[in-house]
Amino acid sequence: MRRLLLLAFIWGWSFLFIKVAVEGMTPTAVAASRIALGAIALLVVLRVRHESLPRSRTFWRHAAVSATFANILPFTMLAWGEERITSALTSVLNASTPLFTAVAAFVYLKQRLDRRDVFGLLIGLAGVAVAAGLGGADVADSSIAGSLAAVAAGACYGFAFTYASKHQMGVSPLVAATGQLTAGAVLMAPVGIGTSVVEGIDLEPHRILAVVLLGAIGTGVAYLLYYRIVADLGPTTTSLVTYIIPVVAVAVGVALLDETFHVRVVIGGAMIIVGIALVQRRLRLPGRTAVVPASTGG
């Protein structure tokens, strides 16, 4: 539990770092930078522990797929989204990750979804709509796009959780995380550099600090911790970290970034949590007995 809390604290602050970094960098440059810095941090740890990365094509193929769905796509979409919506709202919408983990487990691992699961998914998705303010007078088209980007990032994470449980549990957490980020850095570097050349870059000291913390701690250390928790508890249980991340991110965003606090974000977030709890079998419907939360891997 302590490791889940630590991971939630790290990733909760990451939304603030993204918001600060994307003010002077393109979304793809932010994504490429944090992936590269995370890879460097883990490569150093790997070297200190006298471990090496496998050379097999199978390992690198799985690493590339995981990097695409756990790093490249969601990191880019979160940064792009935070150009349009607050870091607090981004974190709440991204908390839908466990819902998409359940869907991915159903599609990819052929796990069954019963009536309770479907009901939970519907409540969770309704919570996403409430938090995003769909139908509200204060939401412009651009913020809807930003909200959709945050939700899409959650969908990518959901698939990544499930994919890792099936294909990357045969190697150590450190090796798996380092290989994933290394593959991501190689794939994303040309894109990040290219967009920076075309659109420009404005690095001030506080933005550089945000990117470094986002990469080394929010990506490198966090993904090592994430892989260890997935190996011990499974992807669905690990995704419970998203219960806590929005609490940290909303508090930090309101306190340090002076972001506007909306009650709908809390209401929508609560609906998402109820939906997740139903999907992960932590609540019971009338006439149903409670069961142990399901895990998509161990």
Image (cartoon, helix red, strand yellow):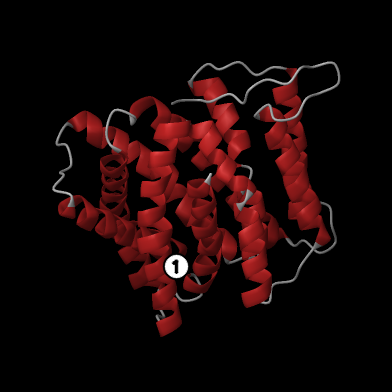
Eyeballing the image, is 282 above or below 150? above
Q: Which residue is depicted at the point 41% across and 53% down?
A: 222
Q: Position of residue 280 (x, y in %)?
A: 65, 29
- Counting every numbered tag in the picture gives 1
Write the residue at 86% across / 21% down.
286
Side of 118 relative to 65 (left or right): right
Image coords of residue 155 (percent x, y): 56, 40
Q: Is residue 149 above or below residue 170?
A: below
Q: Name, please, the residue furthest toward the front.
A: 2
- Residue at 62% over, 26% down: 293
Q: Quadrant of residue 279 in the image?
A: top right
Q: Secondary structure at mark 1?
A: loop
Which residue corresponds to mark 1?
26
Where residue 55 sits in the image (x, y, percent)? Answer: 14, 36
Side of 220 where 97 appears, left or right: right
Q: Residues within 10 Å of mark 1 (few under 14, many from 20)?
A: many
Looking at the image, which residue sits at the far bottom? 204
Give x and y (percent) for residue 229. 44, 39
The answer to whether residue 257 is seen in the rendering is no
Question: Is residue 183 or residue 285 the one in the foreground?
Answer: 285
Query: If the image is split into quadrants, where does the C terminus sit?
Result: top left
Amino acid type of the residue tagged 1 in the rendering: Thr
Residue drawn 54% across and 47% down?
Answer: 153
